[in-house]
Image (tube, rainbow, N blue to C red):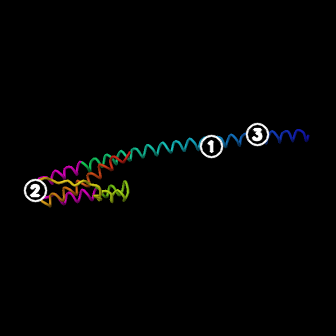
């Protein structure tokens, strides 16, 4: 009887060992597949986010170009309120989507070549140049976002 019991116990232990190994392997494969799925999902979400950000920056560039054209109209007052509203909207968007460092860079004129609006008075010229600086930054941000 002891021979049957020890053989039965040995078979049971081997069975449990095989079941345990198969279970561990299944869990490992499942974790790997889930990790890859999650990485692919995050990449897709990141690309969609970046695409939406680039599209919105393009809209801001278009609006800024319109403001610059308005600054070139000498007979009309400079569009200061519209330019300030545009800059505030852009800054709020940049802070929410890309972070505060983008707002700081958006305002920073460092490295901007001097440009002038021919025949403009100082008010039109200063506003135009302020928009110009910000437009260069938006173009830069658009190129940086993959």
Q: Which residue is mark 1?
A: 28
- Front residue of 72/11: it is 72
Instruction: Give the residues in magenta.
Output: 62-89
Please tell me whether the stretch drawn in magenta is mainly helix, strand or loop: helix
Q: Earlier in the sequence, mark 1 or mark 3?
A: 3
Name which residue lies at 91% across and 40% down.
1
Image side of residue 122 versus residue 143, left or right: left
Quick one: quadrant of the C terminus? top left
Name which residue lies at 79% across and 42% down.
13
Q: Which residue is mark 2?
A: 76
Q: Nearer the viewer, mark 2 or mark 3?
A: 2
Name which residue lies at 71% across and 43% down.
20
Q: Secondary structure at mark 1?
A: helix
Name which residue lies at 46% across and 46% down.
42
Task: In the rendered structure, find residue 8 and report the number of the disc placed on it.
Answer: none
Location of residue 4 with respect to 53 vertically, above or below = above
Q: Is residue 53 magenta?
A: no
Residue 141 % position (x, y):
33, 50
Q: Secondary structure at mark 2?
A: loop
Q: Earlier in the sequence, mark 2 or mark 1?
A: 1
Q: Secondary structure at mark 3?
A: helix
Q: Which residue is mark 3?
A: 15
- Front residue of 20/128: it is 128
- Front residue of 117/33: it is 117
């Amino acid at each position: 009887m002891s021979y049957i019991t020890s053989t039965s116990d040995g078979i049971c232990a081997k069975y449990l060992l095989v079941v345990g190994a198969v279970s561990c392997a299944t869990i490992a494969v499942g974790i790997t597949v889930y990790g890859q799925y999650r990485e692919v999902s995050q990449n897709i979400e990141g690309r969609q986010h970046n695409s939406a950000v680039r599209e919105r920056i393009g809209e801001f560039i278009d609006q800024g170009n319109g403001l610059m054209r308005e600054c070139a109209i000498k007979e009309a007052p400079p569009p200061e309120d519209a330019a300030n509203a545009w800059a505030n909207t852009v800054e709020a968007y940049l802070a929410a989507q890309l972070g505060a460092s983008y707002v700081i860079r958006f305002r920073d004129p460092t490295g901007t070549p001097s440009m002038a609006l021919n025949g403009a008075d100082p008010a039109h010229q200063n506003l135009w140049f302020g928009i110009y600086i910000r437009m260069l930054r938006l173009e830069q941000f658009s190129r940086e976002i993959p």
